[in-house]
Image (cartoon, rainbow, N blue to C red):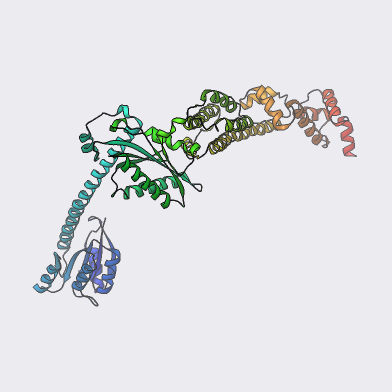
């Protein structure tokens, strides 16, 4: 919608202007009406309307003064000047300030509407031209950036699926500036000194990424990067190892100093490749992972990781934890993780195999819990991305163990809490059913059938939740209700027995005496006396 400001010192003219035109049909909203030039000027500067209809003769500032001062202020609305005079000098003065629309009183509806229509077409044309040009430039740049990122992701994660085009063609298609030389991948991993939420951490990654990009102007390296899985990856094209070492050391030192208050920085460097398509993202990632053994806040070259010869027997641990998760055995999980600590402390153990075990445990936990939740009434939502991020952000092996312990206990406890609440609900429903049907000969099977659960499971659950067997609870409830009824002389003892589920008066008396110590008749006599 376009906006318009009306200014005339005569209130009748202002009202006429507002009623003369069908503003809605022109998609124009009148945002202000002024009766002097000074107010009109200030309103134009603050509201910045698209169209200003103003009388030349105004108290304070004249219409032409308003046009002049507004333009000097850097605001350029489309003016329609109104005058009660036909002198050419007014029109000439208006033209001098670029005003193309000039009306003479008395105002004519068709003439005013035609002028407004001309202005709207002019604004739309200007907006369309400028917006389209800016949009086109932005879209081209955005498309190139997206294509470049997609290429890097394919190169890093699925190089076998990427067509190996000539270097010149890759540069032309994706906007790169690669030259024939050497290639490596560098991974930059910040480890925060204080806990960060996932969104906060993503902001930190972006800040580090943009900080590096802004300082590549003087670097002899050709670098293109992406942010992926809590790390920043740069594909580097360079000429000599000396230039690479010097540039990376400089970047690393700058990063450490710049972000020292927030985080430690670890830089993982892949091995060298003579061709673009043989460069290894995984090597730089593995170099960063090895900080759980070598320590954080340092540069780690993948070529130095050959000393880690041993690997964990992952399947043995997965089988062990599968049993503990299925049985919801938190104590055994805590014990197994504690026992794992000395086993992974071996300095010759490959850090990647340790990391891989903990990632596999996340998938294992999700898989087994999903099976357990299938038998429930609620939707299972597992924050895998969040948990994997926590594992990736662990900086020591002990951090890995504590993180995994926290995740497993939290998820299993949540399931147990749900199960407990569900079990408690079963017991509440069972007790209410017993209370409502105490006069009937109900059995454990009857209640279990009402709850749609297995009778054997219900029997075990009832004993666990109430501390007594179902039959004992039934007897206690019948006797408790019978005591209340016996206090009422309206019912005979046999009638009381029937109202609590005992059709045989002698059997009722026998059960009552065994529970209370005296016969029903004696209880009534004691109470009434």
Left or right of residue 311: residue 420: right
Residue 89 is situated, as x and y percent measured from the top left of the image, at 10, 74
Q: Position of residue 519 (x, y in %)?
A: 88, 29
Q: Nearer the viewer, residue 440 or 361?
A: 361
Q: Where is residue 442 in the image (x, y as percent from the top left)?
A: 71, 24
Please identify the quarter of the rendering in which residue 83 is found.
bottom left
- In this view, 27 is above or below 296: below
| Residue 180 horizontal side relative to residue 472, left or right | left
- The residue drawn where x is 90% and y is 37% is 526
Residue extending farthest bottom: 60
Q: Quadrant of the N terminus?
A: bottom left
Q: Residue furthest left?
A: 88
- Residue 36 in sight here: no
Quadrant, the C terminus:
top right
Q: Which residue lies furthest to the front in this view?
A: 242
How many dots with numbers? Answer: 0
The image position of residue 82, as x and y in percent, is: 17, 69
Q: Who's the residue at 34% across and 29% down the image?
A: 158
Query: 29 or 462: nearer the eye?
Result: 462
- In terms of depth relative to the viewer, which is nearer, 163 or 476? 163
Q: Against 97, is 506 above or below? A: above
Q: Is residue 113 visible?
A: yes
């Amino acid at each position: 919608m376009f906006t318009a400001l009306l200014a005339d010192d005569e209130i009748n003219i202002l009202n006429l202007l507002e009623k003369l035109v069908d503003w809605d049909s022109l998609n124009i909203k009148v945002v202000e009406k002024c009766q002097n030039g000074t107010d009109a000027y200030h309103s134009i500067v603050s509201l910045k309307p698209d169209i200003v209809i103003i009388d030349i003769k105004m108290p304070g500032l004249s219409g032409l003064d308003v046009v002049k001062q507004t333009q000097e202020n850097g605001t350029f609305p489309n003016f329609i000047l109104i005058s009660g005079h036909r002198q050419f000098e007014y029109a000439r003065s208006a033209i001098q300030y670029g005003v193309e629309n000039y009306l003479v009183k008395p105002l004519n509806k068709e003439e005013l509407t035609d002028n407004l229509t001309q202005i709207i077409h002019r604004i739309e044309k200007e907006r369309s031209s400028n917006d389209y040009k800016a949009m086109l430039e932005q879209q081209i740049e955005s498309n190139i950036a997206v294509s470049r990122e997609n290429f890097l992701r394919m190169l890093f994660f699925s190089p076998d699926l990427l067509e190996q085009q000539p270097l010149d063609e890759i540069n032309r298609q994706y906007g790169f500036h690669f030259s024939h030389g050497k290639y490596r991948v560098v991974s930059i991993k910040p480890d925060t000194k204080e806990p960060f939420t996932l969104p906060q951490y993503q902001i930190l990654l972006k800040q580090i990424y943009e900080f590096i990009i802004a300082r590549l102007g003087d670097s002899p390296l050709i670098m293109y990067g992406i942010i992926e899985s809590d790390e920043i990856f740069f594909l580097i094209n360079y000429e000599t190892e000396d230039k690479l070492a010097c540039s990376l050391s400089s970047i690393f030192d700058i990063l450490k100093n710049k972000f020292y208050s927030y985080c430690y920085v670890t830089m993982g460097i892949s091995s060298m490749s003579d061709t673009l398509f043989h460069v290894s993202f995984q090597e730089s990632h593995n170099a960063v992972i090895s900080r759980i053994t070598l320590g954080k806040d340092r540069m780690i070259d993948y070529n130095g990781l050959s000393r880690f010869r041993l690997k964990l027997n992952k399947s043995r641990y997965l089988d062990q934890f599968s049993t503990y998760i299925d049985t919801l055995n938190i104590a055994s999980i805590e014990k197994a993780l504690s026992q794992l600590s000395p086993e992974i402390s071996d300095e010759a153990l490959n850090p990647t195999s340790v990391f891989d075990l903990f990632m596999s445990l996340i998938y294992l936990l999700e898989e087994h819990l999903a099976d357990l939740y299938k038998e429930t009434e609620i939707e299972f939502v597992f924050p895998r991305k969040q948990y994997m991020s926590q594992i990736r952000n662990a900086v020591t092996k002990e951090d890995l163990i504590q993180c995994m312990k926290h995740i497993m206990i939290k998820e299993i406890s949540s399931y147990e809490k749900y199960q407990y609440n569900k079990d408690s609900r079963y017991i509440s429903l069972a007790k209410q059913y017993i209370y409502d049907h105490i006069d009937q000969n109900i059995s454990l099977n009857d209640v279990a059938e009402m709850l749609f659960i297995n009778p054997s499971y219900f029997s075990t659950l009832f004993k666990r939740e109430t501390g007594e067997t179902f039959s004992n609870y039934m007897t206690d409830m019948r006797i408790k209700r019978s005591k209340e009824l016996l206090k009422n002389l309206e019912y005979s003892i046999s009638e009381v027995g029937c109202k609590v589920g005992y059709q045989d008066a002698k059997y009722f008396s026998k059960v009552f005496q065994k529970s209370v110590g005296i016969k029903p008749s004696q209880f009534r006599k004691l109470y009434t006396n």
